Structures are given as C-alpha cells and as structure tokens.
Image: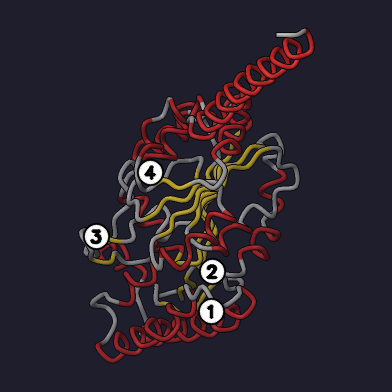
Amino acid sequence: MDKTAMVKLGAAACTGVSALLGGVVLAQYVVAKKKRAGKKTRIIEMMPQFEKSTVHMKDPERVEQIICDLIKGGASKLQIITDFDMTLSKFSINGKRCPTCHNIVDDCKLVTDEGRQKLLQLRHKYYPIEIDPHLTMEEKYPFMVEWYFKAHSLLVEQRLERDKLAEVVRESDVALRDGFEQFFDRLHQHNVPVFIFSAGLGDVLEEIINQAGVYHANVKVVSNFMDFDDNGVLKGFKGELIHVYNKHDGALKNTEYFKQLKEYSNIILLGDSMGDLSMADGVSNVETILKIGFLNDKVEERLDAYLDSYDIVLVRDETLEVPNAILQKVL
C-alpha cells in the first residue's frame, strides 16, 4: 500500500473515531439533560407532600428558588395573605359540597323557605358566571356586584339576629381543610401575621375560626361585616362591598395595615380564584411571594390559567399539607 493510501486510510479511521466519540458525547449530553429535566429540585424533593397527584407546578425550579428565599428570610420576614371560602375551608367532603360563609346563612333555619329559595336561585344564576373560564374578570365584575347586592338585601329582609349566628355555624356542614390546626398554631407560635381577606360574611367567618379554636391574636380578618341595630337585628352591612373580583381595591384600602408590617416583605398567598391573586397589592415592599392556588371546580377548563398565575396549584386537594410542609421548612 503506498503512502497516499495509508494517509487516506488513517484519516478515514480518525474521522470514524471522532464521529463515534462525538456521538457518544452527544448521547451523554442528551441523557444528562433529560435527567436534569426530570430531576426533582432539592428542597421540594425533601417534602413528600409535593409527590401527591394533586400538586401541579408549571415551573418547579422557580418554586424551588422562591421557597429557598422564604427559608432565608425565616419567620421575621414572613406574612400570610389568604382567602377563606374554599381556600382555608373545604370545597367538598366525599363529593358533597361544603358551604361558604354565605351558604351557611342562606341555608339556615333563620331564613324563611321563600327567602332560601330566592337565595338559591341567585346562587344558581351567578356562580356559573363566577367560575366561567371564558369570561374575563372585568366582564364578571358587574355580575358579582349584582349578586352580592341582591343576596345581602334578601338577608336584611330576614331580620337575622346576631346572637343566633354561633348556633347557625355549629349546626352547619362547614369544615376547615385538614391540617388547619397545625397551620394556624404554627403561624401563631412564630408570630407570623395572618391576613384573611374574604368576600364572605365576616361575622360568620370569625365564628367559624373561633369555634375551631384558631382565632389567634396574629389573625386579622377583612370581610363583609354585618351591621346590627340596638336590638341585635341585621339592618345592613358595614363599609364597602368586597366580592371575588374587587380584592385589588380592598387590598389598597388596607395599606395602613401592611405599612405596619413593612419588615414582613416575604408573602405566602393562598387563594382559590383569579381574583385572589391581587390580595397582596397593598404590600409595597414585596421581596418574595409564593402564590398557592386551590383549584376546586371546572378543573380541566381552568388548570392552564391557574398554572400561568399561581406558582403551585392544588387540584381537588382538601388539605393544607403542602402549605404546612413549606411552613415547616421556613419557620
């Protein structure tokens, strides 16, 4: 074989080896990339609660970073801003719907049969609008105002008595999410402020958490509070109406509260609607915020929108296991 042929043969061999090595390296890179993509992030991996099928995240790495920042800040920088109905309270038990604060009163024995029927008709008309994934919040806004105004007017007509609210709550099927004691007690133990921002009935809400033994000194409730006359009979409602889709306005009205908590620049926000995402708008110095959304109804139609808006979405999850697991790391 002449020298030229040997050189060509050697070059071809080198090319083949290079191609082989290149292919191996590329394969290793692809495998490593796939492993990295499928690998759970370290903090989340330490929390088995995140392995539940109810837990959904669009960007686990972002959630990892947020939780790490919350851990660095600790109790001294943390505050909780949360909705109540269907967020701290359960949506259903064994397939049966649980009542909201409004439902508790609507369905109680203090309301006449006629009044109950009218309130139920309002619920059937407006609730589908509230959760309709094809309508914007702006489009839903006037319907929510209309619903609340009509419902509250009907309740005033019933001349409800303040002294009977405790009994009404005791006799209802309301239930707080599993793990609520641990949630409230741990936050109280570490002096973490809890701001409950509800479009429900404040008097009923306070009675629920009071009867549950978790209305601690670190909890502040902003909601629709009833106004009673000198005889303890309902005559109207105090302040401006709070409904599902005007919490931005309510948050800005509570800026004085948030100013008093200016050192608490890390937030865990819990909600169950797109309207709840604006509950922290009154906080001017946010450093870190983790948004946890409970998706209870119309899951298939709304999951993508929730994943785009909330960092963690809990689908048909009637517990506080994930928030509690995070708090256990932070506090």
The residues bearing labels 3 and 4 have C-alpha atoms spaced at a distance of 22 Å
Where does the image place residue 299, in percent across and percent down from the top left? Answer: 41, 63
Where does the image place residue 123, in percent across and percent down from the top left? Answer: 39, 81
- Upstream in sequence: badge 3 or badge 2: 3
- Upstream in sequence: badge 1 or badge 3: 1
Which of the pair 138/83 is nearer the observer? 138
The residues bearing labels 4 and 2 have C-alpha atoms spaced at a distance of 21 Å
Q: Quadrant of the N terminus?
A: top right
Element under disc 2:
loop
**143 w.r.t. 238: above or below:** below
**38 w.r.t. 46: above or below:** below
- Upstream in sequence: badge 2 or badge 1: 1
Mark 2 vs 1: CB contact within 8 A: yes
- Upstream in sequence: badge 3 or badge 4: 3
Where does the image place residue 300, in percent across and percent down from the top left? Answer: 42, 65
**328 w.r.t. 7: above or below:** below
> What residue is disc 3 on?
170
Element under disc 1:
helix
> What residue is disc 2 on?
244
Q: Amino acid at mark 3?
A: Arg
- Pointer 3: residues within 10 angstroms few (<14), some, or many (20+)? few
Residue farthest to the bottom? 114
Element under disc 3:
helix
Depth check, mark 3 against mark 4: the one in front is 4
Residue farthest to the right? 4
> To which quarter of the image does residue 128 belong?
bottom left
Instruction: Identify the mark at residue 320; answer none if there is no mark.
Output: 4
Q: Residue at x 42, y 86 (%)?
A: 125
> What residue is disc 1 on?
144
Element under disc 4:
loop
